[in-house]
Amino acid sequence: MALPGEKAQVLMSPPGRKQLALLSRRKKQVAKQAAVFALFYPSLTNETLLLLIKRKPYKGVHSSQISFPGGKYAESDASLLQTAYRETYEEVGIGHDLIEDVFPMSSIYIPPSNFNVQPYVGLLKETPSFQLCSREVEQVISIPLALLNNGSIVGQHKVSTSYGIDVEVPCFRFQDEIVWGATAMMISEILSLFRKTD
């Protein structure tokens, strides 16, 4: 099935993001590479959940944000997929052997941190036992697929950007947390694929 890419991502894109990406075209050519995993797994009551993490506060543009487990490509990684596996294990303790049916989604460029991120989707057959990296991960946030799919948690929220301005952004609201920006745009593309199979 063809990936919808930007057509789906833009539905959850913050205002002005496209113009910002155009202004950053030169930076994008030398962007740092990263990879993340969007992992679906069953709860103990057999409800399908999407795994997200809340990052620890730190001096950086993504401090305390909700994201997928993943991170920066290392020279020792054989590929970006290997980066996603390694970082997922380091951050939440889910090993390579537990992740099945892996496929790539459309990459996305993040202007504030100058990262080009490659997302992958994977499935876990059993409820995982999380082992969080205390340096990087504040908590696990697992969103029911049923909630995401029916749009009941989609809304708008005012956020302070890394550029020092407040803007209203499309977001997913869940358990007093706000999922916005690149992570919300990745989720939007994943959901568009689910809708195509309905």
Image (spheres, grey):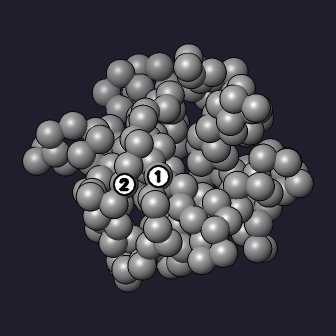
Mark 2 = which residue?
99
Mark drawn on residue 55: none
User: Residue flagged by tag 2: what amino acid is it?
Assistant: Ile
Quarter of the image with the C terminus in it: top right
User: Residue flagged by tag 1: what amino acid is it?
Assistant: Leu
Looking at the rendering, which quadrant does residue 64 occupy?
Answer: bottom right
Q: Secondary structure at mark 2?
A: loop
User: Could you say which is closer to the camera, residue 104 or residue 24?
Assistant: 104
Residue 124 falls left or right of residue 91: right
User: Could you say which is closer to the camera, residue 1 or residue 29?
Assistant: 1
Looking at the rendering, which quadrant does residue 80 occupy?
Answer: top left
Looking at the rendering, which quadrant does residue 48 occupy?
Answer: bottom right
Quarter of the image with the N terminus in it: top right
Mark 1 = which residue?
123
Q: Is residue 19 above or below residue 54?
A: above
User: Could you say which is closer to the camera, residue 77 or residue 146?
Assistant: 146
Image spot of residue 69 (x, y percent): 44, 59
Q: Residue at x 78, y 47 (%)?
A: 149
Q: Residue at x 33, y 49 (%)?
A: 84
Q: Secondary structure at mark 1?
A: strand
User: Could you say which is closer to the camera, residue 153 or residue 198?
Assistant: 198
One can see residue 175 in this view: yes
Image spot of residue 41 (x, y percent): 53, 61
Residue 129 falls left or right of residue 54: left
